[in-house]
Image: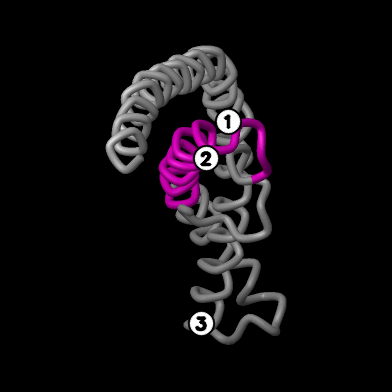
Amino acid sequence: MTKTLAIALSLATLTVAPITSAQAAEDGLRDAARQTVRLPLRAAGVATGLAVGVPMAITRRASNRMIEYTQSFADKIGGHTSAPPVIFASIVGLPFGMLVGTAEGVYVGSTNAIQQGVEKPFSLESLSLAEKLEEH
């Protein structure tokens, strides 16, 4: 009886092992097929992130930097609560803010488009439309 049970158990193990490895190979093929199908979607997500997200990030960063630089320069010549110092400070603050904001926007927008466009195509983060505009 024990010998018969041992033989039956070893035969059951031998027949289950090939099925398990065949299922694992089939699951691997399914995963590879899914990744292949998702590739065009991810590529389109990155391209859309670059086309939409970079200009959006440039706009957001440049406007924030222009305000920051104008207020900072206005504080140095009389305070940002008074109109004349703000007007004079904007002559210098707007171009500097535009220059710095554009460079930051290109970097942050491209980074978001590539990283988030692959992970989460067409998401707010990949299009630089998330609440917080930082690298994620």
Whether tag 3 and tag 2 are in contact, CB under 8 A, the answer is no
Q: Which mark is residue 35?
A: none
Asked if the residue under mark 2 is in contact with the one under mark 1, i.e. CB atoms within 8 Å, the reply is yes
Residue type at mark 2: give it. Gln
Bin the neighbour count of mark 3 within 10 Å (Cα to Cα): few under 14, some 14-19, many 20 and up.
few
Residue 28, above or below 107? above
Give 74 or 122, whichever is nearer the viewer: 122
Q: Which residue is mark 2?
A: 116
How far is disc 1 from disc 2 in space, using C-alphas? 8 Å
Query: Looking at the picture, how far across and down is residue 81, in whole percent?
Result: 69, 84
Task: Please name which of the two marks, 1 or 2, marks the residue nearer to the observer.
Answer: 2
Overall secondary structure of the magenta section: helix
**Figure colour scheme:** one colour
Relative depth, front residue between 34 and 119: 34
Q: Is residue 103 magenta?
A: yes
Q: Are marks 1 and 3 in contact (CB under 8 Å)?
A: no
What separation in Å lies between label 3 and label 2 (alpha carbons)?
42 Å
Pointer 3: what residue?
77
Question: First in sequence: mark 1 or mark 3?
Answer: 1
Look at the image and give the residue range highlighted in magenta. Answer: 100-124
